[in-house]
Image (cartoon, helix red, strand yellow):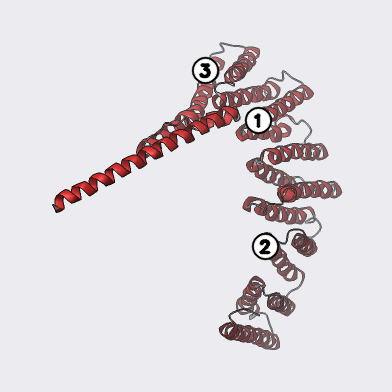
Amino acid sequence: MDKEQQIHEIQERINRLSKDMQSFQQELYVLQARLNTLRENADPLIQEDITHSTIFTGEETTNGSLENYIGLRFMHIIGMLVLVTGLSIGVKYAIDKELISEAMRIILAYTAGVILLVLSLRLKKKYQLFSAILFSGSMASIYFTTYAAFVYYHFFPVFVAFAIMVGLTVYTVFTAINYNRQEIAVLGMVGAYGIPFLISTNAERVDLFFSYIVLINIGVLFISFRRSWKLMQYMALLITWILFTGWALLRYDGSDRLMALVFMSAFYVLFLVSAIARRIGKASSLLPGEIQQVVINNTALYFSLLLLFSNGGFEIQAGGVTGFTALFIALLALLFTQLFPQEIILQRLLAWQAIILLVLFTGIQWDGLTVTLLWIAIAISLFVWGVFNKRPWPRLAAILLTGITLGKLIIFDSANFSTVQKIISFLVIGVLLLLFSFYYQKFNLLNKKTGKEK
């Protein structure tokens, strides 16, 4: 009887689970129908990017997703690379065997690019992802064919080559917005930033070069803001500062300081505004990448100023630059505290930057016992600030700075300080550490009594 009862109970559970599965299956079908309806009304790219799924069980769904990813993305890219490689080998063979003239090489290369472009336009309506990859290949082919025609074969004068490349860049960016594909826009960026290097015949006109970079950055940042393409924004930041600091390091001689300061300021303001633009417009919290952009932008500004004011005595100029940058970033931190009081992480990172630069400023500007006493004064100020504002990070910064000062005293200053200087330094640091320790002991006692920090 017990066995029959168990069989009956198990059978009832199976029946209930079967009904539940049927209910879930019906719900899945309803959701699938709604998803298909949304796909039909969505952007064509989204329709193709989303995997056309049938309802499978776990392993089949995973394998199907991997298969679709390989088929939709990986094979397209590999196929395009293999095709371009094959064309390159064929062209090289024809050149080595002198089967085609120089003009015919350029014509064939342009023809291949145009064929890819036509195919991409023909397939855009039904196969938009595949069309986008074909378009990227066509633009790359036409772009570098123009470069070869100008540099190696001198088929175009400089203004014609410049006009063609600018036109290709604008068209590529416009098409990227139309396709809603960031990778196409990145291709346009590479072309845009590469134009001056590829076709420039007057490397001394740095004013024209940086004016062009400013215009390109305005366009890139506008697109990245409209489409929320953060990769473009970060790439523009890194490329621009690499170009500027590279020029300042290798080509700058001090005669163009005013012009360099103007462009450096323009770059800094442009990337600072782009980092906080979404925060101002939508009143939403800054993304981690946007906070990093502000910090990297400040760091690039500091090193750029060091390079611009390094002529005529680096050590003298470095102190002023470091002090100015520390004051500027501190004011920026105060401004952001007023404008964006919720952005605690950004405020702390800016404050840390300002503190580090202030410590560097005192170390560059003075030496010996003066530096030790100034660092101790900064540590005391930070600790007092942290106590009265009930913030732990300034107190932590004070303790770290005191430890660094003690390490500096033991490792570097002991051999150079007089006996009186050693006595003063060790006494001051020792008293300071004891005061810090007393505060934390008192703080813990207060916590035990009241359960909160005062």
From what the image shows, is residue 117 above or below residue 347?
above
Q: Quadrant of residue 344?
A: bottom right
Using a 10 Å C-alpha cutoff, classify the residue at mark 3 as few (fewer than 14 neighbours), some (14 to 19) or many (20 or more).
few
Q: If you read the primary sequence from the N terminus, does the residue marked by circle 2 or circle 1 appear first? A: 1
Q: Residue at x 50, y 21 (%)?
A: 86
Q: CA distance from mark 2 to mark 3?
A: 59 Å
Looking at the picture, tell me which residue is in the foreground, 443 or 217: 443
Q: Quadrant of residue 449?
A: bottom right
Q: Label 1: which residue? A: 176
Which mark identifies residue 92? none
Using a 10 Å C-alpha cutoff, classify the residue at mark 1 as few (fewer than 14 neighbours), some (14 to 19) or many (20 or more).
many
Looking at the picture, tell me which residue is in the foreground, 367 or 137: 137
The location of residue 108, given as percent across then percent down, is 61, 14
Q: Amino acid at mark 3?
A: Gly
Viewed as shown, does residue 285 lie left or right of 32?
Answer: right
Q: CA distance from mark 3 to mark 1?
A: 30 Å
Looking at the picture, tell me which residue is in the foreground, 251 or 7: 7
From what the image shows, is residue 407 above or below residue 318?
below
Q: Label 3: which residue? A: 90
Numbered disc 3: secondary structure: helix
Numbered disc 2: secondary structure: helix
Q: CA distance from mark 2 to mark 1?
A: 36 Å
Position of the C terminus, as image quadrant, is bottom right
The location of residue 187, given as percent across then percent down, is 63, 32
Q: Residue at x 52, y 25 (%)?
A: 80
Q: If you read the primary sequence from the N terminus, does the residue marked by circle 2 or circle 3 appear first? A: 3
Q: Mark 3 or mark 1: which is in front?
A: 1
Q: Label 2: which residue? A: 344
Q: Amino acid at mark 1?
A: Ala
Using a 10 Å C-alpha cutoff, classify the residue at mark 2 as few (fewer than 14 neighbours), some (14 to 19) or many (20 or more).
few
